[in-house]
Amino acid sequence: QVQLVESGGGLVQAGDSLRLSCTASGHTFSYYAMGWFRQAPAKEREFVAATSWSGGTTLYTDSVKGRFTISRDDTKNTVYLQMNSLKPEDTAVYYCALDPHVIATMSEEYYNYWGQGTQVTVSS
């Protein structure tokens, strides 16, 4: 069974950086896209970033463009989210998700597998 495990969350101050990791196991997909989503307290889960199967195409929500970078290392079955210049409004539980298709997408409906989430808290 497919398993996604996130790590790297924590408590930081505004302006700091964090790198989230998500390692996938138990799947047999040769090509798959990966995404990061987040959910702040009392808010809907929202798209953050996605990468296509090759890493050649990346997508970001407007609020993180220029600050966050998604990347993948398929030798390690791992996708990363480098988060710089963090703001208090970035505080949320961050989830990685796997989409068994090749194209990066912002739509949750295409992501069949989800991790358990990792908390990111940014203090002002």
Image (tube, grey):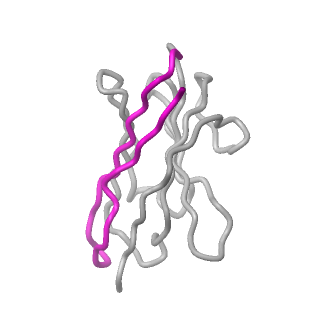
Position of 65 relative to 31 (above/below): below
Indicate yes or no whether the magenta region holds residue 12.
Answer: yes
Residue 110 coordinates in the image, percent (x, y) = 69, 35
Indicate yes or no whether the magenta region holds residue 102.
Answer: no
Q: Residue furthest right?
A: 109
Q: Residue furthest bottom?
A: 124
Residue, x 34% and y 45% (percent of image)?
A: 21
Position of 62 relative to 53 (above/below): below
Image quadrant where residue 80 sits: top left
Q: How many marks?
A: 0
Residue 13 coordinates in the image, percent (x, y) = 28, 78
Residue, x 50% and y 13% (percent of image)?
A: 30
Quadrant, the N terminus: top right
Quadrant, the C terminus: bottom left
Residue 70 coordinates in the image, percent (x, y) = 41, 43
Q: Residue furthest front?
A: 1
Q: In the image, 18: left or right of 69? A: left
Q: In the image, 96: left or right of 9? A: right
* Nearest the eye: 81 or 23: 23
* Nearest the eye: 73 or 113: 113
Q: In the image, 44: left or right of 82? A: right
* Nearest the eye: 4 or 30: 4
Q: In the image, 113: left or right of 15? A: right
Residue, x 52% and y 29% (percent of image)?
A: 2
Residue 114 coordinates in the image, percent (x, y) = 56, 42
Residue, x 45% and y 22% (percent of image)?
A: 54
* Nearest the eye: 30 or 55: 30
Q: Find the magenta span and give its range.
A: 1-29
